[in-house]
Amino acid sequence: MKAMLRLHLIGIALAAVVAGLLVPLPAEAQQPPDRLKSLTISVWLEYDRPGALYILRGELHAGTSLPARLIFRVPARSGGPSSTAGIDANGQFRYVRPTQQQDGESIIVEYETSWPRFQFEYYDDALLRQDQKRELEFSYRADYAIEQLALEVKEPYGATSFGVDPAASSQSQGEDGLTVHRRDLGAMAPGQEVQWKVSYNKSDPRLSREALGLQELGSSPYEAGPGVVPPAQGQNRIVWALLALLGIGALGGLWLALRSGNGQPDAAPALNGGRRGRKRPAKGLPEPPQVRPAKYCHRCGTALAKNDAFCRRCGTKRRGT
């Protein structure tokens, strides 16, 4: 019976190990992608803070392994990104906490995304002001190979004599009614740099959000953990946890079975309902004769009381005690 139990437990443990090998491990963070399918850099001038809000929206190349680790550089004077997120299949922003490292006049920003689309934002006040005149020279050095790069500039509320150099490819109106200038640049090689100069006049000191009565953008909370795990990877981790518990339980049962097999048998219960009785002779041997205490002293013949161990007259030891 014990041998069958041991074989059964060994079989469970081996099955757990084999099943675990068949389940893929949760994907670890990959190397930074070598290229982006697209990247759009939008500059919102004097929108909800002095200076400009920079919004980088992009999509990974179709062959990129997920999750992917994104790395970008932002000016050190910006203080780092205000938000970093991946965008899931439903268009929901999944905010992921980044890591930052100072590197001279830049901050290296890294974070993981489990979805092909992403977006991160930062503020930078590099706007030159002289009375009502404003000037901004924006430059971007490509961190990756980019198949389609586009630059956008949103005019601030109350801007006049607005101009961009080089000229924009197109103009449109944003949801807030402000004009957006777009410049399509096409493919970019890693390290390639592009510049755009903006100039305008502004007499109204109010920011666009205040003047238009728009809701404050605010900050978005990061989701728990360093990154977000898609449902498929989460299910793999649950399966691995269950298999680990199964293997631990099987090995624990095997250890207990082996230990009980090497232990000593339990002692036999006491006779007569738990009262300790005298030892029985080995089977086949005669019962030893019982000797009763003598009633009279064998030396002087004096009668002995029930509890006397010695004769009260001559002091001889009572027979049978």
Image (cartoon, rainbow, N blue to C red):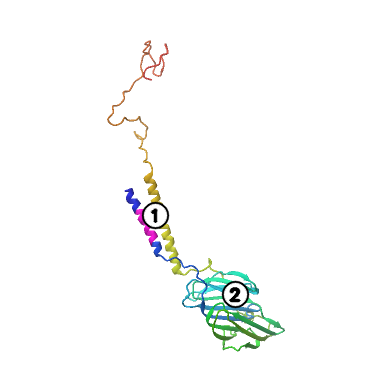
Badge 1: few (under 14), some or many (20 or more) residues near its Cα, within 10 Å? many
Between discs 1 and 2, the one toward the N terminus? 2
| Among the 4 quarters of the image, the one containing residue 78 | bottom right
Q: Residue 90 carries which label?
A: none
* Rendered-image quadrant of the C terminus: top left
* Residue 217 appears anywhere in the view: no
Residue segment shown in magenta: 8-18
Q: Residue 75 at what x, y percent from top left?
A: 63, 75
Task: Please state which amino acid type lies under the numbered disc 2.
Answer: Arg
In the rendering, at what x and y percent does residue 64 appear? 48, 75
Q: Do the residues under discs 1 and 2 have CB atoms within 8 angstroms?
A: no
Residue on which disc 2 sits:
73
From mark 1 to mark 2, how far is it between C-alphas?
Answer: 51 Å
Q: Check disc 2 and report its element: helix, strand or loop.
A: strand
| Magenta stretch: dominant secondary structure | helix
Q: Residues within 10 Å of mark 2 (few under 14, many from 20)?
A: many
- What residue is pinned by disc 1? 250
Say which residue appears at 39% left-offset and 59% top-offset: 16
From the viewer's perspective, is 42 left or right of 299? right
Rendered location of residue 126, percent (x, y): 66, 79
Residue under the point 62% across and 81% down = 139
Q: Is residue 185 visible?
A: yes
Q: In the orientation shown, which residue stands out farthest toward the right? A: 131
Q: Nearer the viewer, residue 2 or 52?
A: 2
Residue in the picture at 34% in, 54% down: 8
Queried whether the magenta region covers residue 54, the answer comes back as no
Q: In which quarter of the image is residue 153?
A: bottom right
287 is higher (above) or lower (below) than 38: above
| Vertical side of 124 occupied by 201: above or below | below
